[in-house]
């Protein structure tokens, strides 16, 4: 009997860090160019490869979506409440979404934040 070749699939590493930021700097939350710069730097700090950034002004606030090779980074802002939500999701063991998230917290000058982490890894 011939041996059956078993395919070995690599482990998929998925790390997600997301949360709410409170008492942020209102002017930064309104400024799309600042938010794009922050997301660009967050990708670098998290060792991620930035592919594209899209940003929209929504009322006083903004939504910024960065597509990274490893997945995405998003910031949604409500300046009237000094509030933002942030999501950093990255696949691959080389990236550090927590570092990227904390950089965003610092840049938005959040006085308080709630950070959640999810392991989105899978073995095949």
Image: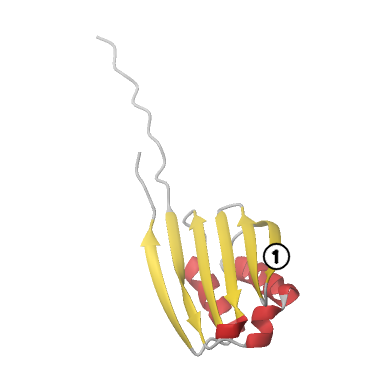
What is the quadrant of residue 43 in the picture?
Answer: bottom right
Who's the residue at 61% across and 52% down the image?
A: 69
Q: Position of residue 51 (x, y in %)?
A: 68, 54
Q: Which is nearer the eye, 11 or 69?
A: 69
Number of marks in the rendered image:
1
Residue, far left? 1
- Furthest residue to the top? 1
Task: State whether residue 10 is above or below residue 63.
Answer: above
Kindly state the secondary structure of the residue where label 1 is placed. strand
Q: Quadrant of the C terminus?
A: top left
**Rendered image quadrant of residue 38:** bottom right
Viewer can see residue 82? no
The residue under the point 50% across, 90% down is 111
Q: Residue at x 64, y 80 (%)?
A: 29
Q: Position of residue 77 (x, y in %)?
A: 59, 75
Question: Could you tell whether 123 is left or right of 73 in the image?
Answer: left
Question: Quick one: which residue is furthest to the front in this view?
Answer: 59
Work out whether residue 31 or residue 78 is closer to the camera in this orientation and state it. Answer: 78
Question: Can you identify the residue that label 1 sits on?
Answer: 56
Report if residue 28 is visible in the image: yes
Estimate the x, y position of residue 3 in percent, counting from the top left.
Answer: 29, 16
Left or right side of 18 for 64: right
Residue 1, image quadrant = top left
Please give left or right for residue 73 compared with residue 27 in the image: left
For mark 1, does the 10 Å Cα neighbourhood hold few (<14), some (14 to 19), or many (20 or more) residues?
few
**Which color scheme does this rendered protein use?**
secondary structure
Residue drawn where x is 40% and y is 36% of the image = 9
């Amino acid at each position: 009997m011939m041996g059956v070749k078993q395919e070995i699939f690599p482990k998929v590493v998925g790390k997600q860090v997301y949360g709410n930021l409170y008492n942020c700097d209102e002017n930064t939350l309104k400024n799309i160019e600042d938010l794009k710069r922050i997301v660009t730097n967050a990708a670098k700090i998290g060792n991620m490869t930035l592919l594209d950034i899209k940003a929209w002004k929504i009322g006083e606030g903004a939504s910024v979506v960065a597509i990274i090779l490893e997945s995405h980074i998003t910031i949604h802002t409500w300046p009237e409440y000094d509030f933002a939500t942030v999501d950093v999701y990255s696949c691959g063991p080389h990236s550090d979404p927590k570092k990227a998230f904390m950089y965003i917290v610092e840049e938005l000058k959040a006085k308080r934040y709630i950070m959640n982490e999810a392991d989105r890894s899978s073995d095949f």
